[in-house]
Image (cartoon, rainbow, N blue to C red):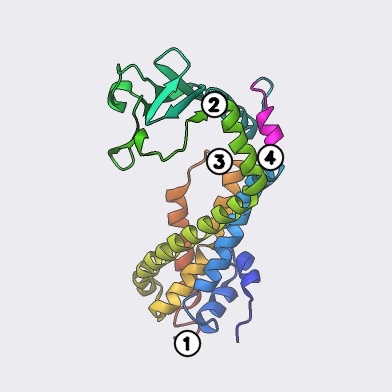
Amino acid sequence: MKNFSIWKALFLSFFSPDLYRDVAQNWRGVGFSYLFVLVFFTLLIVSAQFVFAYSTLTYESLHDVKAEGTNSEAEIMQAAFADFVNQIPRGKVFKGELDVDVPQPYYMYFDDGQEKIPLIMFDTTGKFMSVEEAEVPILVTKKYIQVNQKDKNKIETYNLDEMETNGPIFFGPDEAWNLVKMFFEEFKWITLAVVGMCALLAMYVYKIIVVMVYALLGLLIRYLVRSDCTYDTILRLACVAITPTMIVSSLLMIFMPTLDLHLVFVGVNLLYLGFALYCNRRSVVGIKA
């Protein structure tokens, strides 16, 4: 029977030899249930600030935000989003062709507070036929839309005549804001829940891979500290050994987001794993595999 619960392990993992002996001798399985709780706990820390800001965000505050006088990063991004929506030109799509009522080429910029980045170009004159010529991520022409997917190293083309409509589709800032309002009324919290679950699952899978690699390294470290722990036991210990760096890194992401200590944390994790194996060396306790 284990002496320390999962919740106590979150804090005792920083310093307690007794915890690491308990994990090796009395805990069962490979530690993935503990790892899930750890990932959930640290994700709560990281996302708390975002969730609070998101919960206070409303359609009215977003629609009426002004770029002047913004202070926080969240306010700057809200102002940038509102400005971007208001840049959408008035126009329509009818019978597979686009018509916009602005001088062309027309650029839509995203202002992140430091520079104005051109994201979309509208050109129905035929002067620009590809995103390479336009040098923007998205090009909207009279008959098609091109998207430069740099992460996939390819360009996607979407023909406007493939849009099935019973009449002209009108668009502009007012129509865009109506969609934003519908999102806040219908999908705000559903979106947060879906994004949260996806983030939790992705982080959990990633950390499983990480601790499996640490456990393989632990097979080498155990000989240095003269431990007889099996791979399953080392895997349990690895799940607990990464706790301190996960908690500290989560707090740093809130208070010092620009500080990158990734390589330092890798070294610290290995030290904690070595400490966990040292606490379970054969001269101190008999290991139950």
Residue 75 position, x and y percent, is: 65, 31
Mark 2, secondary structure of its residue? loop
Which quadrant, please, contains the N terminus? bottom right
Q: How many other residues sit within 10 Å of disc 1, few (<14), some (14-19) or many (≥20)? A: few
Residue that badge 3 annotates? 257
Q: Is residue 215 above or below residue 24?
A: above
Foreground mark, 4 or 2, reads: 2
Residue that badge 2 annotates? 172
Mark 2 and mark 3: Cα distance apart in space: 37 Å
Foreground mark, 2 or 1, reads: 2
Residue furthest to the top in view is 103
Residue that badge 1 annotates? 288
Nearer-N-terminus badge (4/1): 4
Q: What stretch is highlighted in magenta?
A: 59-67
The answer to whether the residue labelled 2 contacts the one labelled 1, judged by CB atoms less than 8 Å apart, is: no
Foreground mark, 1 or 3, reads: 3
